Every structure is written in structure tokens, then in C-alpha cells.
Amino acid sequence: MNKLHMGPAHCALDIGDGSERAEYVDQDYILHRLGRPHRAVNIMYTYYPHDAEWPARISEAWKDRNVTFAWDYPYDDYFPYDVDGQPFAQMRDIRRHGQEVLLTLTVDCGLTDDELRGIARQLRSFGRMMLRINHECCGDWFQHNKRYTYAQVGAFFVRFAGILRAEAPNVRTIFCGGWGLPDGHVEQEEAFRDCYAAADLWSCDCYPALHYGWPYDVAEVGGGRYKVDPIDALVEQFVRTYKRATELAGESKPMITAEFNTDGDVTGPLAQGDSVVRFARWWRDNRVDWFRSISLYQFRDRGRLGLECEDPNNKSVGVEQPLLSAYRDRLLYDPWFMPEMTEGEAAAFPAELRWGSSEDADGLAIPIAFEGNPVFCEMTVEQDIGLMAELNGRWFYKAPGTRTVDMMSAFFDRPLDGPATLTLRVFAPPADGVNVDDGSGDWMTNYRAVLAAPPAMRIRYQAPGVVG
């Protein structure tokens, strides 16, 4: 058994989970459907606490009004922030499953410093999360652009980023602005020039095809509000944006796309996955080192922007789309998009496991000998500890209150054709989804747990009975 370090992928994959177009889907379900965790999960919230309709979800408060566009509400139709325990329950769910939080928050630029400090302090225990503040801020559809000038939105980002750096240094900020232009500048450059230096990461949302009139019209040949962009043109825009952002900030920072998908409303569901795969593989094939993550929007969607479509008869049910298999089978397990695993020196029990993030964690690599393809394969850990474990390419979650995890699904699609020694990779993300202030100087960015004894494996090669 050896120590094991999990480091960043060349280009990480994130997933959106819940927005104005969908409900949140719990991480156990997503893990079972896809077989491995993402680097981060993007959840989308809004915070306008001084508005008359607050704290209602605005589409519910205005359900009897005549609305003809998705953003024609007094404030943005995301989940209300800090209402009914959310987003914090979802954030804990995400982190328990070995992923980081990417919180998108549209927020009133008129909030005071004290109100912003309150938000920052709420985020201290959620590790190395990312906060995307007032995204797509060069547009004119969100409330931050309807109520405030571009310059005011830019100044707010810088102010909020400074407060976060002082109050919650574990939080990394994302500036999601406009595109680089052919003249060498970026959209609304004067208003947002200081944001590039203030942010930790830069992003542009990217949709090769988008039915932006959804759900108020239908995308048809010759009708409906939609657009289509070629992959090469989008890549060129990212290159221009990164180049100018680096000049404005005076240094290089990671470029990501925090929202990306091709809309099946425009291309049809059968062709949807092709451009998604081509876009991601362009960065792989060209080995671009500054483009660091793609966040697919999203897991489940009421339109056709999801790996699943929400069943209109039952919002808790998802209908798999062809995009799901294209994404899972052609991208999710591509080494370029997977975290790097590095084995180190020998380890022994009891073993300390450290979780910094899904891009910086110390776990264990435990060799497991198999005589052949098993009939049963189960892992038992008596300890009250939360674990993420990977075997034969498939990941499993063990909750603190769970004793035994069935791992046979690791062999359904990848059976062994003879004797083999596989590596059981084990990590311990925060058991309750939060870092605990234990007095250590790095508690905001590191969580530690001790695994007292090795997992007990039940591996059997013969079934108890055979039906004749």
C-alpha cells in the first residue's frame, strides 16, 4: 500500500446542477449515472434581499404575470440565496462526494460591505470553492446590468473580491466577462479592466448553439430566437480573450468556461454531442496549458441543455439524452480531462488522509488481487468516516453511516479476463461536506481524517446457487 496524491487534470470537467431551467439533482444519482465525480459542480443562485418579492423564487412570485422572456422578472430567476438552508445543503452534498463547489451568484451591486462580509463568512468552511459573481456582465439581460452601469458592475466585482480575500481567503473568484475583439481589446474594457487583476480565474460562457427564446418560443427553421456559432470561431474568441486579459492583469491566470453546451433544441438531440466533443478535444489536441476547465451546462434540464431532460410529468425523473453517452464515453474518461494520480512512499494504518480539493488530495493506493472476474465484490469499512473510492475505473461513495458498499458495478462494463491486481484508490473528503475549524492554520483549505484500518473486501468467484 502506498500514499497517493490526486492532482489537477490538464483540463478539468465540471457539471452544472440546477438553474432557472432545472432543479438540483443529488450527487449520489449523478455519480451512479456517470461513474466518476467531476472537479466541481456549478449551482446557480441570486441574492436581492431588499426587493419586495424576496425571498420568493421570482418565477413563483410572478407566476400570474405576463412574462415573455426568461429574464423579464424583477430579479433573476435562480434559486434564492440563503433561503431554506440553501445553497449550503447542496454545497455539503457536493463536497461529501469529492467535488468542489462552483457557486454562481447574481447579487445586488447595492449591498453594503457588511452585507458582503456576511456572505463571505458563510463560505469559509467550504474549502477551495469558486464564486462566479454577476456573470455574463457584458450583456443586458441580468438584473446587475439592468439596474447598474457596466462601470458600477465592474467596481462591485472588485469590491466583493477584496472582501472575500480578507474574510474568506479559501474562495477563488471567477470573472465572467465579455469576449476578446478583433481590435485586440475586450468588450466593455474600460468598465471591467480592473476585474481581470482582481479575479482568480477568467471565464466566458460558451454555447455553440443556443435557443435563447426558450421556453417562450420554439426553435424552427425560419422561426424562433436561437443562434449557432462554429467551433473554430469560438476557439479564436477564447484565444483573443485570454491574450488581452493577461495584458490587462499583468499576469497569466487560468481561463475556463463556466457554462458550455450545444442546445439540442437547435441541433436536435442526436447531433448535440458532436460539437460538444469537438470543442473539448480541440483544447486537448492542441495541448493548451492555460485553458483549464469546461463546465457542462447541465446535468438535467427542462429544455434540451442537459445530459437528461426533466420529465414534464414528474420533475424528479430524468430522461437520458444521447448527449449523456457521448459526454461520458468520449470525454469524461479521457486522460486529458481526468485528475492525475501519483503514487508515493509506502503507507501503513492508521493512515492520515488529507483533502485540500479535488485537485489536491492525499489518499491511499491499496493493491487488490483478483483471481479473475468476480461474482461479488464489496468493500466494508466499519469506521464512521466518509470515503470516495475508485476501483477498475469506477468511483463509489461511502457515507459516514454506511458500512458496506457494493462495487460490482465496476465490472459490469469492464470485466476481467483473467487474474489481475487492481488498485483501490481511497480518499476522505469532508464527512459533513464542510471543513472544521480545529485551530490549525490551514483549516479553511485542508480537511484531515484518519482511516484506522484497511477496508475489508468480500470478493467471490462463485455464486451460491445456479437456477436450472
Image (tube, rainbow, N blue to C red):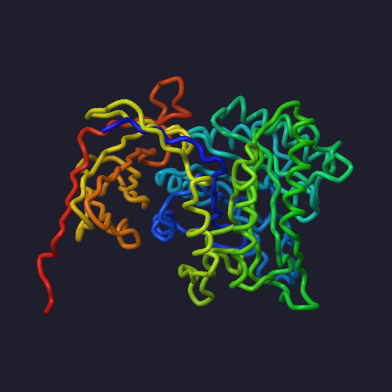
Q: Percent x, y for residue 113?
A: 68, 31
* Residue sitting at x 22%, y 32%: 452
The answer to whether 172 is drawn above or below residue 378 in the figure is above
Residue 232, above or below 365: below
Q: Quadrant of residue 303?
A: bottom right
The residue at 85%/42% (across/down) is 188
Tell me where residue 61 sits by quadrant: bottom right
- 110 left or right, relative to 454: right
Q: Is residue 243 left or right of 80 when viewed as pictured?
A: right
Q: Along the line of sight, which residue is nearer the eye, 355 or 58?
A: 355
Residue nearest the observer in this picture, 284 or 435: 284
* Quadrant containing the C terminus in the rendered view: bottom left
Q: Residue at x 49, y 64 (%)?
A: 325
Image quadrant for the N terminus? top left
Nearer-the-camera pick, 90 or 398: 398
Report x, y in % for residue 244: 79, 36
- What is the number of callouts on the image? 0
Q: Nearer the viewer, residue 17 or 153?
A: 17
**Relative horizontal placement of residue 432, taking residue 453 as reference (left or right):** right
Left or right, 358 with respect to 207, comes to left
Residue 189 appears at what percent x and percent y?
A: 84, 38
Question: On screen, 302 above or below 359?
Answer: below
Which residue is farthest front? 418
User: Residue 186: image x %, image y %?
Assistant: 82, 41
Residue under the image location 42 percent in, 37 percent down: 341
